[in-house]
Image: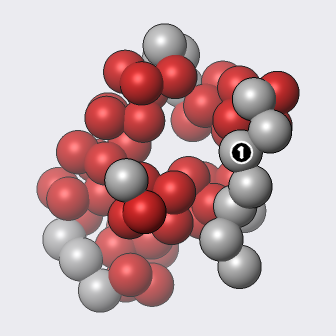
Amino acid sequence: TPRELDVLALLAQGLTNKEIAQRLVISHGTVRQHAYNLYQKLQVNTRQQAVMKAVDLGIRFPE
């Protein structure tokens, strides 16, 4: 989803879930759910793996 891509872009910048929540004005739990959804879709287990897989797949991060 577009919001998951927003979260992924901020994960790629090294932000914590709390920082992402503050930046996107959403709850910490919502960030965790978006990250979990990303991990499932990308078939990975960590944020680093998610970012690397996204880059490998050519996913562009929103600015």
Asked whether residue 14 is in view, the answer is no
Q: Residue 32, how many percent across, how many down?
A: 28, 47
Residue carrying label 1: 59
Tell me if mark 1 has few (under 14), some (14-19) or many (20+) residues whose alpha carbon lies within 10 angstroms of its own: few
What colour scheme governs how the chains and residues are painted in the rendered image of this protein? secondary structure
Q: Nearer the viewer, residue 29 or 51?
A: 51
Q: Residue 42, relative to residue 60: is it above or below?
A: above
Q: Residue at x 37, y 21 (%)?
A: 40
Q: Residue at x 74, y 55 (%)?
A: 60
Please tell me whether mark 1 sits on a helix, a strand or a loop. loop
Amino acid on which the number 1 mark rests in the picture: Ile
Q: Residue 4, how many percent across, how many down?
A: 41, 54
Q: Quadrant of residue 17?
A: bottom left
Asked whether residue 20 is in view, the answer is yes
| Residue 25 relative to residue 45: left or right | left
Q: Residue 11, how many percent across, how many down?
A: 60, 54
Q: Quadrant of the C terminus?
A: bottom right
Q: Quadrant of residue 61?
A: bottom right
Q: Residue 26, how many percent across, how many down?
A: 24, 77
Q: Nearer the viewer, residue 41 or 39?
A: 41
